[in-house]
Image (cartoon, rainbow, N blue to C red):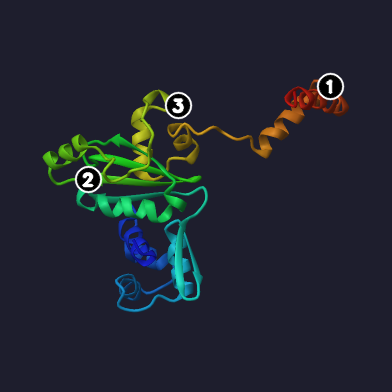
Amino acid sequence: MKPIEALDFVVRHTAYKSTKAIASIAETDPANLYSCLSGKRAMPQHTAAKVAAAVGLKALHSKDAMTLSIDDGIAITLKFETNELTQFSELVKALSPDSRYAWTVIPGDTDITFILIAAIGESYLIGLVSSDSIEEGLNIIAGGFERFLNSKKITYNESTINIGTDHFLTRLKSGILGNSTLDILFQKKATAKISDWARLLIALEKMGVDPSRVQSKLHLLDGATSI
C-alpha cells in the first residue's frame, strides 16, 4: 500500500469524523483533499503533514517522496466493512516497521461484527468491522484472521481487562479507551515512569531513609548481578 493510499484509507474510515471534518481540522478545502487523496492532483507537503496529524499519523517527506508512520502513543479507530479487511491488513503492514506488530480480535455486538486491534510499537490501530450479512461475518470469523494478519496473535482474555466488559467494549467502539488498558490486553509489561520514581523517593524520605543508605544497597545489588 502506497503512503497516499494509506492516508486515503485512514481519512475515509476514521470513526465518527467525516472527511469534511478532517479537512476542516487540517485547514484545507474538502474538495481539494478529495482530489489529492484520489491522486488527481499532488498533495502539498504542508497539507499532507496536517491531514496526517489530524488522523494520528506522521507524514515525512524526502526528495518529494512521502513516508507515513503512526504517531507514538496514539490509538487510531477506524470503521469499515468486511470487504475492506484486506486493505486494513495492508495498512497495518504499511505502518509497521519491518512488519513487526501484534494483533487480536474481539467479538462485537449488534452494529459491530468484530473488532480487530493491531499493536504497532507503542500505538494501536483499531478496526471496527461491520457486515451487512450475518452469514458473511460468521464465515470470516470461522475462517480466521491469520490470512489477513500474519504476524503475532495475542489471545484475548477477559481476565486481563480490569474494567467491566460492557464498558470496555463501549469505550473501545467510541475511540476513547486509554492505551494503558490496551497495553494490559496485549500483555505488555508496564515500564516505570518518572512519576513512579518520584513517589518512591517521597515514600523513602517519609520512612527516614538516607540517600547514602539507598546508594549502598544499590552497590550490593550491582555486586549480586555481576556474579
On the image, numbered disc 1 is attached to which residue?
Answer: 208
- Residue at 29 percent across and 71 percent down: it is 38
Q: Is residue 52 above or below residue 72?
A: below
Is 36 placed left or right of 129 in the picture?
Answer: right
Q: Give the residue at x 38% y 78%.
A: 42
Query: Could you tell me which secondary element the residue under label 3 belongs to?
Result: loop
How far apart are labels 2 and 1 at the CA level?
59 Å
x, y percent for residue 206 = 79, 23
Q: CA distance from mark 1 to mark 3?
A: 35 Å
Quick one: label 2 or label 1, which is nearer the N terminus? Answer: 2
Callout 2 amino acid: Ser
The earlier-in-sequence mark between 2 and 3 is 2
Nearer to us of marks 2 and 1 is: 2
User: Which residue, given by chain and number where applicable, does mark 3 sit on?
Assistant: 162
Q: At which x and y percent is residue 117?
A: 36, 42
Labels 1 and 3 touching (C-beta < 8 A)? no
Choose between 58 and 65: the one closer to the eye: 65
Give, as a three-letter code, the residue at label 3. Answer: Asn
Mark seen at residue 130: 2
Residue at 32% from the left image edge and 50% from the top image edge: 89
Label tally: 3
Picture coordinates of residue 201 (x, y %)? 76, 30
The N terminus sits in image quarter: bottom left
- For the residue pair 4 and 200, the one nearer the viewer reads as 4
The x, y position of residue 9, in whole percent, is 32, 60
- Three-letter code for the amino acid on which mark 1 is drawn: Gly
> Against 76, is 169 above or below?
above
Is the residue marked by circle 2 packed among few (<14), some (14-19), or many (20+) residues within 10 Å? many
SS of the residue under disc 1:
loop
Dot 2: what SS?
strand
Residue 109 appears left or right of 8: left
